[in-house]
Image: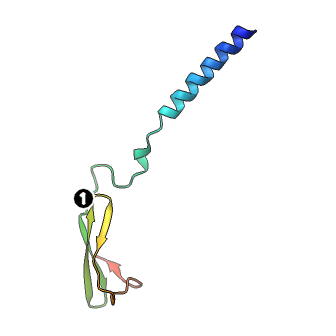
Amino acid sequence: MMKHLTKLSWVLLLSGCLLLSSCDKSEDDPFTGGDNYITSFVLKNGDQTITAAIDEDKIVVTAPATFSLASATAR
């Protein structure tokens, strides 16, 4: 009976290790892969336009304080 419990414990332990090591967290990253070719875009609000850039995994926007993003559209 004790041998059976020991064997079962090892099987469960090894199965748990296998399941935990099979997860790959990089699948949830939207910036990984080979099809992300967008490097910049333009935000337009009325007659004002602001250029935004994508650097690694950050979107960089430099806008004056008077520029409102409330009704801005990306182009």
Q: Please give the count of numbered marks on the rendered protein.
A: 1
Please tell me whether residue 49 is drawn above or below residue 6 in the rendered image. Answer: below
Measuring 28% from the left and 58% from the top, which residue is drawn there?
Answer: 56
Q: Is residue 54 left or right of residue 8?
A: left
Q: In this rendering, is residue 12 above or below 54?
A: above
Tell which of 34 and 11 is nearer to you.
11
Mark 1 closeness class: few <14, some 14–19, many ≥20 residues within 10 Å: few
Q: Is residue 68 left or right of residue 13?
A: left
Q: Residue at x 27, y 77 (%)?
A: 62
Determine whether 15 is above or below 50 in the image.
above
Query: In the rendered view of the protein, which quadrant contains the C terminus?
Result: bottom left
| Place of residue 5 in the rendered image (x, y in percent of width and height, measured from the top left) | 71, 15
Q: Is residue 26 above or below residue 41?
A: above
Three-letter code, disc 1: Tyr
Q: Residue 18's x, y, as percent?
A: 51, 27
Which residue is disc 1 drawn over?
37
Tag 1's secondary structure?
A: loop
Quarter of the rendering containing residue 47:
bottom left
Identity of the residue drawn at 40% across and 85% down: 71
What residue appears at the point 25 percent right and 84 percent down from the top-left corner?
Answer: 49
Q: Position of residue 35 (x, y in %)?
A: 28, 53
